[in-house]
Amino acid sequence: MQQSTGANAVARALTEAGVQWVFSLSGNQILDLYDALLDTGIKLIHTRHEAAAGHMADAWGRLTGQPGVFLVTAGPGHANGAVAAGVAGAAEAPLLWLSGGSPLAQAGRGAFQEQDQVGLAAPVCKAAWCASDHQALPQLIAAALDLAAADPPGPVHVTIPTDIQAATVAGDADAPAGPPQEGAQGEADEAAGIEAIVALLAAAQRPLILARPSLDRGQARRDLDAFLELTGIPGVIVESPRGLNDPAQPGVIGALGRADAVLLLGPADFSVGFASPEALAPGCRVAQIASPNEPAAAAASVVLCTGVRRGLEQLTAAAAGRTWQRRAWWQPGLPDASPRGRQPSSEEGIRALEVCHAVLDRIGPGDCVISDGGEFGQWARLATASARAAGTTVVLNGKHGSIGTAVPFALAAKLARPAARVVAFSGDGGFGYHALELDTAVRYRLPVLIVVGNDARWGSEWHQQIDRYGADRIFETALLPTRYDQFATALGAAGERVETAAALPAAVDRAYEALAAGRPYLLDVRIVSLPGPAPSP
C-alpha cells in the first residue's frame, strides 16, 4: 500500500465522506492540509477572517443537511473560529471545525501558538478532540462527521497537530475509541414515556408544541409537520435570539399562557422561558423530549432523553393508533407588519419594512433570504415571514444572538443553491464585522445581494439606552454615515446609496439586474432609526 501523510489521510477521509467545500483561512499550522487538499476534488473557499469561514460552514450545514467543514490555523486562528462554532451550536447546524495545532511532541514546552484548543472548543461543541494518532485520522474524521450530523446536529472540533499532519501513514488502522456514549433509557421506560406523552396531548383541550431549531430543516421538518397534521396540535419552531418574543411569530406568548399542555421538543432554555411556572398557565402540564445533558423543564411530568428525532418518530407511531379531536383553539399565523406601539421618528430616511418589502417582492420559492441580527435584522425577520410561507428559504442568525453573519451566510447559500437568488439583510453595525467578505464574493464570483440598513448607529443598544436611561444618556453607540456602497465598489463588487423611498424601486431593479449578470451588489440604504418590531400579543 502506498504511504501517505496524516494530512493526506484527512483529505482522503473528507473526500470519501462527500465533502465538496472547505471554508478556510490559511496559516502556518495547516499548510500540509492545504497541500493535501490540492490533490482532491474538494474546493477551498479562502475567506478574510476565520469566523467568516466558520459562518459559511454553518450556513452550508443548515441548507444542505451535510456537515459544513471549516479549517483554520492554530492559536489565534483557532480562537477566532470559536465564535462561529457557538453560533452554529445554538442553531443546531452540523459542522466540522478543523484546526491546526502546535506539534504534539512539543506539548507543554511553550511551542509556537500552543494553547488548550480542545478546552476552548469544548464548551461550544458537541465534542472536541485532539488527534494523537496519525494512523487513526481517517476514522477520527469519519466519527466527527457522523457526530456532527447526529440528532441534534451541531459542531464537532478536531485539532490536528502539525507533526500528526506530517507523519507517514501506512496500512489500515483500527478505529479509535469514539465519543463517550450517554446512558440510554431502557426500552420499557421509553415506551411508557411515549404513551404518557401521547395520552397527555390527547386529553388536553389546548395543547401546544414548541420545537427546537433543527426540526425546521429537511426531513426533520417534514416529520414534524406530519405529526402536527396527524394530531391537529399547533406547533412552532423556536429559533430566534428573542425566543418567544419573536415578532415574526405572533401570538405565541399568549398561546403559551393559555395552553393546558405543552410538549417541548428540545431543551428548556431561555428561548422557551425555561418552561417555568411564570411562563405557563396555572395547571398546565409539561412533557419534554430532548437529548441527554440538555436542560430539563422542572415542571415536566414526563422527560425523555431519547433525542428529538427518535422521540418524534415514536410519538408519530403511537399517535397513529388514536383518533384525534381537532381542537382549533390557536393557530400560528403571519405577523402584522405594522410597527405596533412605536412612535414615528422625525429622522429622515426610509422605513426598514419598506426597504425589506421592496427587495422581497422579487423573491420567490427556491430563493434564499438571510436575516442578520440587530434592529434592522428584526424588521427583516418580520418581513420575511410571508416569503417563508411562500416557500422561500430563510436563514437567521439564530438563538445565539450573534450579529455579523449576513455576508458569509449569503456566500455559502449561493454555493449551496447556485440557481437561487440570495439576498442578505444587515444593519450597518453588523455589516462591519465581515464586510471584507465582499472581496471573497468577488474572487469566487458569487453574485449575492447585500442590503445594508444604514442609520449610523448600533441600533439595538442606542434604543435600549434611551428606554432604560433616557435620551440624554446615549453613550458611544453612534457610527458614521459611511458610504458602504463605495466600499463595495472599491472591492470590485457593485453598489449604490439609496437616500429616498422614491429612489428605492429603481435601485432594486438595478440590484437584481446585477445579480442576473453574475455580479455581487450592495444596496446602502439610509433608514429611519426605529426600535425593532414588538411581538404581537
Image: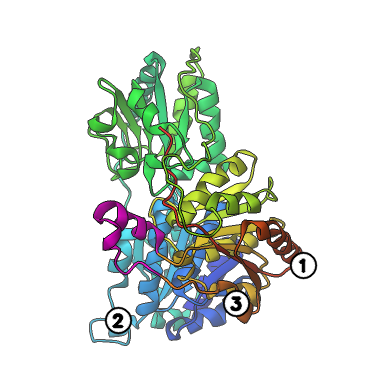
Which one is nearer the viewer's eye here, 32 or 518?
518
**Mark positioned earlier in the residue sequence (3 or 2):** 2
Stretch in magenta: 458-478
The extreme front residue here reads 346
- Residue 94 locus on image (x, y percent): 48, 55
Numbered tag placed on residue 114 in the rendering = 2
Q: Is residue 187 visible?
A: yes
Indicate the secondary structure of the residue bearing disc 1. loop
Q: Are marks 3 and 2 in contact (CB under 8 Å)?
A: no
- The amino acid on which the numbered mark 2 sits, given as a three-letter code, is Glu
Badge 3: residue crowd in 10 Å (few <14, some 14–19, many ≥20): some
- Residue 383 locus on image (x, y percent): 56, 46
- The amino acid on which the numbered mark 3 sits, given as a three-letter code, is Gln
Q: Name the mark nearer the viewer: 3 or 1.
A: 3
Q: Is the C terminus in the top left, top right, bottom left or bottom right quadrant?
A: top left
State the residue at coordinates (49%, 57%).
Answer: 528
Q: Indicate the quadrant where residue 488 lies.
A: bottom right
**Mark positioned earlier in the residue sequence (1 or 2):** 2
Q: Is the N terminus in the top left, top right, bottom left or bottom right quadrant?
A: bottom right
State the residue at coordinates (38%, 39%).
Answer: 244
Q: Which residue is mark 3?
A: 486
Most common SS among magenta residues: helix
Badge 2: residue crowd in 10 Å (few <14, some 14–19, many ≥20): some
